[in-house]
Image (spheres, rainbow, N blue to C red):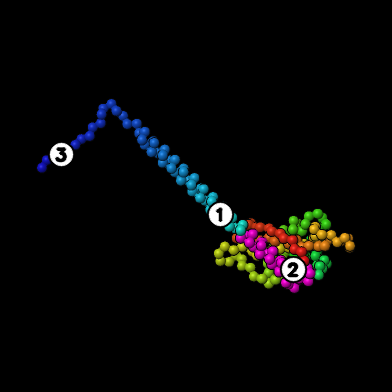
């Protein structure tokens, strides 16, 4: 048996320039940049979705606080304050304890109480969910829950839609401002309602 040997020859006078290597490297660079941009877009979309979810949790907590305030005004130990229109329980600058907790008189300085009270502060004169109504609100436990219970305050304000001509007085309504929190303390939502007795 004979072994065959083959030899490969290149033409003389021809040099290789490596242009195909440069082209492949450029294509690889473009594909890498597209992949990095796609990953960045996916991360931004995930972060946006998380922030939206956290805001929805905060809004739902604030809505729950409005419902708790409504129960406070209609079906609690303090409901007579609202049905009998006892204005003496509404304290300038908001009450801080007992039956006056979170009840704010009409502001004479021009700014309403909900703009002057830092509702996120732990020592603020606000009613925490369930304080008066004894309702329960899950926070900070397993899963994605608000970091703390929602809070609210109730202001007594003149009813803009009516005026008693016989007595020359304007009836009062109640403006309820509630703040809910998301899974992180910096996520907060504020909602309001007007309540007429």
Q: Nearer the viewer, mark 3 or mark 2?
A: 2
Secondary element at image label 2: helix
Quarter of the figure that contains the C terminus: bottom right
Secondary element at image label 1: helix
What residue did someone put label 2 on? 73
Q: How many marks?
A: 3
Q: Residue at x 46, y 42 (%)?
A: 33
What residue did someone put label 3 on? 4
Q: Residue at x 56, y 54 (%)?
A: 49
Q: Main secondary structure of the magenta part?
A: helix
Q: Residues within 10 Å of mark 2 (few under 14, many from 20)?
A: many
x then y, percent, for residue 101: 75, 67
Q: Do we see residue 35 in this rendering?
A: yes
Q: Which mark is residue 135?
A: none
Earlier-in-chain disc, 3 versus 2 = 3
Q: Residue furthest left?
A: 1
Label 2, label 1: how far apart the Cα atoms are: 36 Å
Residue numbers of the magenta segment = 57-83
Earlier-in-chain disc, 3 versus 1 = 3
Q: Residues within 10 Å of mark 3 (few under 14, many from 20)?
A: few
Q: Nearer the viewer, residue 181 or 65?
A: 65
Earlier-in-chain disc, 2 versus 1 = 1
Quarter of the figure that contains the N terminus: top left
Q: Residues within 10 Å of mark 1 (few under 14, many from 20)?
A: few
Label 3, label 2: how far apart the Cα atoms are: 104 Å
Label 3, label 1: how far apart the Cα atoms are: 68 Å
x then y, percent, for residue 110: 81, 54
Is residue 172 toward the left or the right of residue 25 in the image? right
Relative to 16, say whether 138 is above or below. Answer: below
Instruction: Name the quadrant containing residue 67.
Output: bottom right
What residue did someone put label 1 on? 49
């Amino acid at each position: 048996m004979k072994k065959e040997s083959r030899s490969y020859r290149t033409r003389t006078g021809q040099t290789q320039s490596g242009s195909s290597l440069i082209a492949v490297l450029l294509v690889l660079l473009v594909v890498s940049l597209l992949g990095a941009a796609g990953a960045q877009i996916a991360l931004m979309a995930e972060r946006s979705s998380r922030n939206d979810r956290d805001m929805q949790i905060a809004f739902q907590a604030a809505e729950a606080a409005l419902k708790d305030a409504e129960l406070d005004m209609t079906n609690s130990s303090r409901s007579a304050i609202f049905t009998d229109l006892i204005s003496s329980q509404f304290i300038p600058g908001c009450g801080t304890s007992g039956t006056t907790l979170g009840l704010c008189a009409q502001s004479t300085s021009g700014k309403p109480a909900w703009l002057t009270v830092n509702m996120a502060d732990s020592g603020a004169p606000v009613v925490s969910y369930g304080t008066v109504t004894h309702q329960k609100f899950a926070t900070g436990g397993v899963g994605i829950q608000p970091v703390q219970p929602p809070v609210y305050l109730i202001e007594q304000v003149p009813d803009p839609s009516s005026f008693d001509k016989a007595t020359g007085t304007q009836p009062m309504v109640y403006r309820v401002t509630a703040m809910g929190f998301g899974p992180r303390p910096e996520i907060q939502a504020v909602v309001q309602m007007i309540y007429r007795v």
